[in-house]
Image (cartoon, coloured by chain):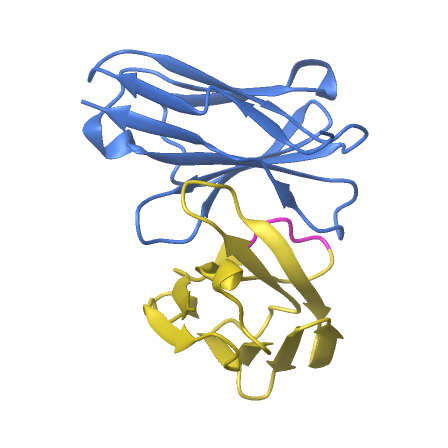
Chain colours: A yellow, B blue
Amino acid sequence: QKEVEQDPGPLSVPEGAIVSLNCTYSNSAFQYFMWYRQYSRKGPELLMYTYSSGNKEDGRFTAQVDKSSKYISLFIRDSQPSDSATYLCAMSAGLYSIKLVFGAGTILRVKS
Amino acid sequence: DTGVSQDPRHKITKRGQNVTFRCDPISEHNRLYWYRQTLGQGPEFLTYFQNEAQLEKSRLLSDRFSAERPKGSFSTLEIQRTEQGDSAMYLCASSLGIQDTQYFGPGTRLTVL
């Protein structure tokens, strides 16, 4: 079983919809949680960065972390066709851990 | 553009050949990382440098792989005697501090025929 599980999709939604993307993980040592967006044949681009549990909002994006359930989410409001990409969750353990562990990524398609 | 840059962007080679990739991190970032990403998967950690010192290597990094970061600036990743299983996107990332976020380059896509 992988340390980080993420539904690969694809997830197809109409423009303007609220999108919910999720990851579950098994390593309770993970404390830092990130969401990256990756367009086709490009490198991952950091969207959100969260430490420990709680919510963080940035424009149309909201990241949630529930450490008790080992579950993280990314919500995208008012989705746009330009949001069509692969969304990768990533996480790392303690203060001196340098290795990011990624989910497989969820493909999102926003239809205009 | 002051982001992470990688060269070449694409590389096609025949099985058994050696290839070398280059990564230029964001200026002043003293930490540099290499990841490998295969189709339909997230990036997997390969190795990490703090300045010129290679501090951690993944089990994924076989003896055919070697990475260097002379003078703590750019880094190279060499794969010797390439195999078809080496076909992947090789991503480089850099960060300023150990708790700082990692910024990724565009990647080098390797195809081994």
Q: Position of residue B31 (x, y in %)?
A: 71, 35
Q: Is residue B109 within the magenta segment? A: no
Question: Where's the C terminus of chain A, which quadrant?
Answer: bottom left
Choose top left, top right, bottom left or bottom right for residue B93.
Answer: top right
Query: Against B71, is A101 above or below?
Result: below
Q: Position of residue B24 (x, y in %)?
A: 64, 23
Measured as percent of width and height from the top left, residue A82 is found at 52, 59
Check the image and name the residue furthest to the front.
A112
Residue A38 position within the rendered picture, expressed as x and y whole percent measured from the top left: 49, 51
Secondary structure mainly formed by the magenta segment: loop
Q: Residue at x 35, y 73 (%)?
A: A12
Question: Can you name the residue that lies furthest to the right here?
Answer: B28
**Front in this rendered view, residue A106 or A59:** A59
- Residue A88: tell me if it is visible: no
Q: Is residue B87 left or right of residue B98?
A: left
Quarter of the rendering occupied by the N terminus of chain A: bottom left
- Residue at image position (55%, 78%) is A73
**What range is drawn magenta here?**
A96-100
B80 displayed left or right of A54: left
Q: Residue at x 42, y 77 (%)?
A: A14
Furthest-top residue in view?
B17
- Between A16 and B105, the one lying in front of the other is A16
Quarter of the figure with residue A49: bottom right
Of A54 and B61, the residue lying toward us: A54
Which residue is pictured at 38% across the width and 30% down the height? B109
**Occupied quadrant, residue A5:** bottom left
